[in-house]
Amino acid sequence: MRLTDDSIRKAKRPTSGQDFLWDDLLQGFGVRLTPTKASFVVTWREPDGKRPRETLRGRVGAITTAQARELARKRLGEVTGNAEHGGMVPLRAAMRTWYERQSELGVWRPRYRARVDGIIATYVEGEERIRVKLTPAVKAAVDALGAKPAASVTRTDVMRVADGISPGMAESFMAILSSYFNSAYERGIVTGNPARNRLRVTGGRRVRSRKLSDAEFLTLWRAIQAEGDPAIGAFELLAYTGCRRREITNLQWPEVNLEAGTITLPPERRKTGKRDPEPFVINLHAAAIAAIKRQPILDGSPFVFWGRRDKRPFDFPHALMDRIKPIVQDWRLHDLRRYMRSGLAQLGVSQTVAEQCLGHKIGGLVGVYDQHSYQTEMREAWLRWGEHLSRLTVPK
């Protein structure tokens, strides 16, 4: 059974001795029931066949079942992560161990780390998610894949899952599996990589080329404007700056200088931060500055656009996007970057300046030899683009 707070609460206690309930999501995680109490436990098999069992810190009721499962994953990662018997560990436990290790090493940016976590949880561990709908056949394939020893996973096991999900998700799923198996191969845990050549399997890397027209952008602008702040404020800044979604939704007040009319993003908040360790300075049009000034300051929160709970940063909620998305066919928030980049070209901005406005690192010999900062040219480009948007959006 899949352990939950509710299922543990309803479980019948033994009149004497002890009973165990084991989780079908994470092998080795369970609850020990006695006549007087319930405790979270974790167990695993040693190479010599012994099965040690430990009680997890945090009693039932003091922490949630989900929190206890995470503690169990960490502990299993510590005891099953060696090459001597790592190949016999179920893939779901082996990949969770690998994920925890990579996270501790800081290999991934926070956003990508969360994506890796979600894909492992959904497509290897079989955790059900509200917005992910899997057919019974794919669910069975996920359960079978996660339960198989890592060293025994075959290409067929992987493809049963990949063939049943969307091509884009299949590519991400196989990329993460391939990364794990490459690491396991180097450590002698497995002898091959059943997720290799993922792009060939999923039809190659898909490059999105959707370009919003001015009319489509204006339609979206007006629809989101009706939603009010912080949605329209964040949308305005995405449109005026060409920034990536979370560079704006996670924007913090210390990064904003309203007097200078700039946003300064530290390297750790940027996709290219490791390759471009200098802070990225964005010049704001007057309309973008006005959008920021409209945002109320929440005591104790550093975020310009803040969410409703726990002082978290704002993000475009699913309910809002479900209302807005049908208004214009096949669009995403990221398309605003392509809309701005194409618009800068139409305004006569040079390719080098336009690329740098998007925060793209200029590579090749051009990047090696051209060390000009282009700050003045970028400032002029952002302001010209801002004037174009203002003429488009201000009612005549």
Image: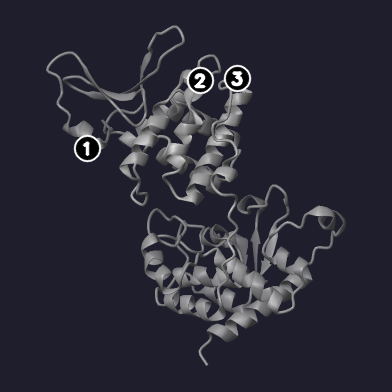
The residue identified by callout 3 is: 188
115 sits left or right of 244 in the view: left
Q: Nearer the viewer, mark 2 or mark 1?
A: 2
Residue in the image at 57% along x and 41% along y: 198
Q: Residue 17, image x and y in percent?
A: 18, 13
Above or below 153: residue 211: below
Above or below 227: residue 396: below
Q: Quadrant of residue 101?
A: top right
Above or below 377: residue 139: above
Q: Distance between the residues labelled 2 and 3?
A: 9 Å
Q: Residue 358, image x and y in percent?
A: 67, 64
The residue identified by callout 1 is: 6
199 sits left or right of 149 in the view: right
21 sits left or right of 196 in the view: left
208 sits left or right of 275 in the view: left
At label 3, counting other C-alpha atoms closer than 10 Å, the crowd grade (few under 14, some 14-19, many 20 or more) is some
Q: Which numbered disc, 2 or 3, marks the residue that appears first in the sequence?
A: 2
At label 1, counting other C-alpha atoms closer than 10 Å, the crowd grade (few under 14, some 14-19, many 20 or more) is few
Q: Are marks 2 and 1 in contact (CB under 8 Å)?
A: no
Q: Which numbered disc, 2 or 1, marks the residue that appears first in the sequence?
A: 1
Residue in the image at 16% along x and 20% along y: 35
Q: Nearer the viewer, residue 66 or 171?
A: 171
Question: Which type of secondary structure does the marked residue at label 2 adopt?
Answer: helix
Q: Distance between the residues labelled 2 and 1?
A: 34 Å
- What amino acid type is highlighted by mark number 1? Asp
Question: Which type of secondary structure does the marked residue at label 3 adopt?
Answer: loop
Q: In which quarter of the image is residue 157?
A: top left
Q: Nearer the viewer, residue 109 or 295?
A: 109
Q: Residue 264, image x and y in percent?
A: 66, 61
